[in-house]
Image (cartoon, rainbow, N blue to C red):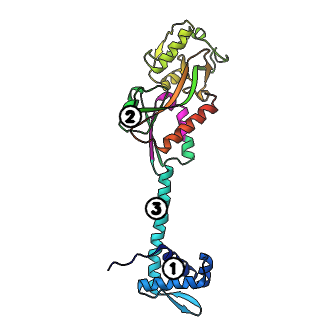
Amino acid sequence: MATPKLKERHLEIFRIVMATQSLTAAARHLGVSQPSLSVAIKRLEDQLGVALFARISGRMVPTEEARLILAEVERVHQQSEMLSDVVYSIARGQATTFRFGATPSIGMRLLPKAVRQLQLKGTAGTYYCDSLPQRDVRDYLLFGQGSCVATIATVEDPLIDTVKIGEANLVCVVPAGHALASLSSVTPGDIMGDTLISFTPATTHGLHIDETFRRWGVVRETSVFVHFVEAALSFVAEGIGITILDAFSAMDCTSSGLVAIPIENSVTVSAYVHSCLLRPRPLAADKLIAELRAIAADAGMR
């Protein structure tokens, strides 16, 4: 015959009586009557086939068997509490690894600020950020290498979901001591004659810059070509020339001794978070989107 399972309520009563060694105190703690508590203990003893307490001088004195049972009950109780904590931690994302990607324009300034907020709020246990060229974004998502990618470029694929997080204009980044640094805004014509550090026409930045120059009837003349915004900013910091970037990339550039000046009548650059429709977007990705939007809004970006 199968051994009947112990009821959780009986074990709870047993723990409290063991702790108080008094039916009166245990009944008060559990919010029940003393007679009903006495019946519950008797049922547990009958089920186990062993005496758990001896009544000596009005107190419930545990037997040796009761002490051994309590040790096991406490061990399982602690494991149960740990399991509960782990389950809640997973549900909140705190026990998971949040892997995501970003292209350099978003990854330079905007993304680190958002990740810092996620870290402070305990959104994930571990963060894994991949720096990606735009050409790798689609495969990165479709093959499940990461949960999402933040970038300023669109991804044309029916299996990719896109969420817009903000908009910004182009800015001209110059050294703090440059002649243009004191201006509130500049035009492409103001930039002509300076050594321009920029991108090829086929890149996302190159397309945005060329479209802005066309609005002014000016042809872009690049002296130094680079592939990534980090290189453009580093070259400007070394006094090699000036550059044109989206305002996302130029956030906080004053800390590097640079000044970002808005370009009049520039195109609007949108920032996005892409994810794959083939799998659910994790809660951490939704929280990242919210933080990115909040930081972009605080920085005056639409």
Q: Which residue is mark 3?
A: 83
Local packing at callout 3 (Cα closer than 10 Å; few below 14, some 14-19, many 20+) is few
Local packing at callout 2 (Cα closer than 10 Å; few below 14, some 14-19, many 20+) is many
Local packing at callout 1 (Cα closer than 10 Å; few below 14, some 14-19, many 20+) is many
On the image, the x and y values in percent for residue 291 come to 57, 38
Label 1 close to label 3 by CB (< 8 Å)? no
> Is 190 placed above or below 181 here?
above
Q: Residue 14: which numbered mark, if any?
A: 1
- Which of the two discs, 3 and 2, labels the residue nearer the N terminus? 3
Amino acid marked by disc 3 = Leu
Label 3 close to label 2 by CB (< 8 Å)? no
Residue at (45% x, 41% y) in the render: 281
Residue 165 falls within the magenta-colored stretch: no
Q: Residue 140: which numbered mark, if any?
A: 2
Quadrant containing the N terminus in the rendered view: bottom left
- Which element is circle 1 on? helix
Asked whether 92 or 278 is in front, the reply is 278
Amino acid marked by disc 1 = Phe
Which image quarter: residue 58? bottom right
CA distance separating discs 2 and 1: 55 Å
Outermost residue, bottom side: 57
- Which of the two discs, 2 and 1, labels the residue nearer the N terminus? 1
CA distance separating discs 1 and 3: 22 Å
**Magenta region, residue range:** 97-115
- For the question of whether residue 296 can be seen, the reply is yes
